[in-house]
Amino acid sequence: MKTLLPFVFALGTALCWGLYGPTLGKARLVDPDATPFKPYVGIGVAYLVIAIFGGLVAMKVVGKDSFDFTGSVSRWGFAAGTLGALGALSLTLSMFSGGARIPHAVMPVVFGGAVSISALYTIIRSGGSLHGGPLLWVGIVGMGISAVLIAANTPHPNPKKPAEKTEAVQAAETPAGHGS
């Protein structure tokens, strides 16, 4: 079971982040006059609350960590948080610039691109060799093709049409003596 646990949490991440884009798109569509930074502030508050309180509670439960936040671990954590926040800002701007209407197309690019960048980074960090074997490159190209196929074939609802008025509503709205 211990070897499955990382994959259970990875699937939890995929679930949350898979719903992140459409939820962010919805935040954009409910008030098109609002700037994209209003939901972004909400994202930041959620990150702060969950990361800080959740992290502190987990540290206390595990009991191994000190509450000293200096040193390399904290700097690398801050760097990772910065990348996460910049990614969230970039996705927010994506949704602001038209992606809110097509999260089914944006999110496969985000996640397919993230997987490919992570693989390339690992190759570079593991000795600078740009050889990952032919299947890595097939996978990266396949990821790009998959992102396009997923985006192109994901069903999505058509925009809602304004509700048609019933005859009773039209009659009630028509001033007396001005019938059609």
Image: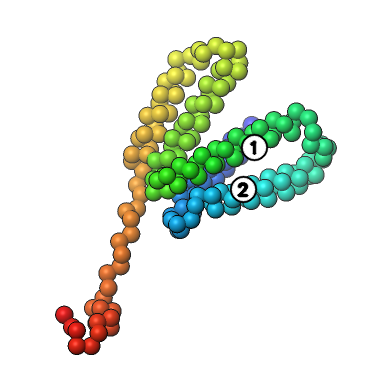
Question: Which corner quadrant holds the C terminus?
Answer: bottom left
1 shown above or below 134: below
- Toward the left, the furthest residue is 180
Mark 2 and mark 1: Cα distance apart in space: 11 Å
Question: Which corner quadrant holds the N terminus?
Answer: top right
Name the residue carrying label 2. 44
Q: Position of residue 179 (x, y in %)?
A: 18, 83
**Relative horizontal placement of residue 70, taking residue 29 as reference (left or right):** right
**Relative horizontal placement of residue 138, taking residue 74 as reference (left or right):** left
Q: In front here: 9 or 35? A: 35
Q: Residue at x 45, y 42 (%)?
A: 94
Q: In front here: 166 or 153? A: 166
Q: Residue at x 80, y 44 (%)?
A: 60
Name the amino acid type tagged 2.
Gly
Badge 1 marks a residue whose secondary structure is helix
Name the amino acid type tagged 1.
Gly
Q: In front here: 170 or 15? A: 170
Name the residue carrying label 1. 81
Q: Residue at x 42, y 48 (%)?
A: 100
